[in-house]
């Protein structure tokens, strides 16, 4: 499970509102009393892949025919759907990582470049805007990398077949997510093409940076002053950096993983254990937090930090894109990432 940034919250719906949303869905009518305009034509191919049933930890999604109206929750599903030729009619908003357009920039760029209609955004997280989802009249709801609860799933699956995570919340591997979404959208054979393309984009970038070979790194995070955590090698943001040619510091494997996560909280008092890391990767939620973290003596004493070998940003779209691997984030982030890494590697003298 990746470390999550606090999503923008909306007031929670009352139980009566949730019940009303489910009733509207089961009744087959939108909140406005009429069906929304159809989504732009999609490149969907044939319908031989249907019907299909996708199991998840929360239940089964039985998709009887080719979906046209797609709604996504969590992270990564929107980008994969777009890459497969399906622009969702609705997506969970993520204001923290969005740019001035109000959208995650790689999503905005991909949709507008294709001449499509930008998806309707709605609140997700703990306070899913069920009313808006009902109004969108989806054929399928994709949430394989999300934190939806059993209760939320019950409401969502009453609106449309809902594809949740196969095991635990926020635990689906990026390639597994692509496979699940491709199957749900009737394009199972295209999953491996997307996965192979992502891997090639990263390996091609790594081939241009032979100076990264043998450079070790730790990817850390804090939950506030006095705290320190380390992401494990299998976590997506670490996997991205590794795929660009750097090597995770072996010390990371000595830390006990926090249950249900791909990370370990080690405490700032153990900062010296990262002394062997040539580079430190991290992120900050804002400039004020960055100053507070960097002012801590134990943090500042980490050799890589002290020498300036830190790859960090408080640009929220970049932080978001570099934290998730999918068909749109990887090509968007690579050219922005490499100059930051180059500067840090130069401090190592390697």
Image (spheres, grey):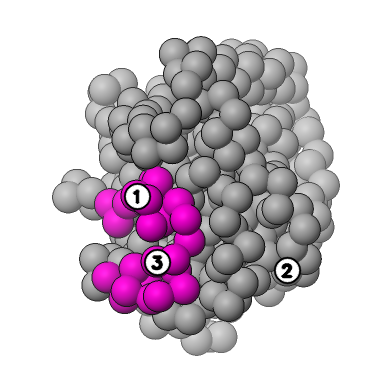
Mark 3 or 2: the one toward you: 3
Residue under label 3: 300
- Mark 2 neighbour class, 10 Å CA radius: few under 14, some 14 to 19, many 20 or more: few
The residue at the point 34 percent across, 49 percent down is 308
Residue 288 appears anywhere in the view: yes
- Mark 3 neighbour class, 10 Å CA radius: few under 14, some 14 to 19, many 20 or more: some
The residue at the point 63 percent across, 42 percent down is 248
* Residue 330: percent from left, percent from top: 46, 30
Residue under label 1: 308
* Residue 258 badge: 2
Q: Is mark 2 on a helix, strand or loop?
A: loop
Number of numbered discs present?
Answer: 3
The relative height of residue 89 versus residue 51 in the rendered view (above or below) is below
Observer-nearest residue: 4 or 154? 4
Q: What stretch is highlighted in magenta?
A: 291-315
The relative height of residue 141 versus residue 177 in the rendered view (above or below) is below
* Residue 61: percent from left, percent from top: 75, 47
Residue 233, quarter of the rendered image: top right
């Amino acid at each position: 499970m990746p470390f999550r940034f606090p999503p923008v919250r909306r007031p929670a719906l009352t139980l009566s509102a949730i019940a009303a949303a489910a009733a509207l869905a089961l009744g087959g009518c939108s909140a406005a009393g009429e069906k929304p305009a159809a989504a732009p034509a999609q490149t969907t191919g044939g319908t031989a892949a249907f019907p299909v049933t996708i199991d998840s930890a929360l239940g089964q999604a039985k998709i009887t025919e080719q979906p046209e109206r797609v709604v996504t929750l969590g992270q990564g599903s929107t980008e994969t759907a777009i890459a497969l030729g399906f622009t969702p009619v609705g997506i969970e908003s993520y204001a923290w990582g969005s740019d001035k357009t109000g959208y995650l920039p790689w999503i905005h760029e991909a949709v507008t470049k294709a001449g499509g209609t930008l998806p309707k955004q709605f609140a997700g997280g703990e306070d899913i805007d069920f009313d808006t989802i009902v109004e969108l009249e989806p054929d399928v709801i994709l949430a394989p990398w999300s934190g939806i609860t059993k209760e939320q799933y019950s409401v969502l699956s009453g609106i449309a077949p809902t594809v949740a995570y196969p095991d635990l919340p926020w635990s689906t591997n990026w390639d597994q997510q692509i496979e699940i979404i491709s199957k749900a959208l009737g394009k199972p054979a295209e999953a491996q093409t997307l996965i192979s393309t992502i891997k090639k984009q990263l390996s091609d970038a790594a081939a241009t940076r032979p100076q990264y070979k043998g450079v070790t790194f730790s990817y850390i995070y804090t939950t506030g002053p006095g705290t320190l955590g380390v992401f494990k090698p299998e976590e997506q943001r670490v996997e991205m950096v590794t795929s660009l040619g750097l090597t995770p510091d072996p010390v990371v494997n000595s830390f006990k993983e926090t249950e249900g996560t791909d990370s370990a909280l080690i405490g700032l008092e153990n900062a010296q254990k990262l002394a062997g890391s040539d580079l430190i990767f991290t992120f900050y939620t804002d400039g004020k937090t960055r100053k507070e973290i960097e002012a801590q003596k134990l943090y500042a004493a980490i050799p890589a930090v002290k020498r300036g070998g830190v790859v960090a940003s408080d640009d929220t779209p970049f932080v978001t894109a570099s934290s998730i691997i999918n068909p749109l984030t990887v090509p968007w982030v690579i050219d922005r990432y490499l100059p930051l890494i180059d500067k840090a590697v130069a401090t190592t003298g390697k």
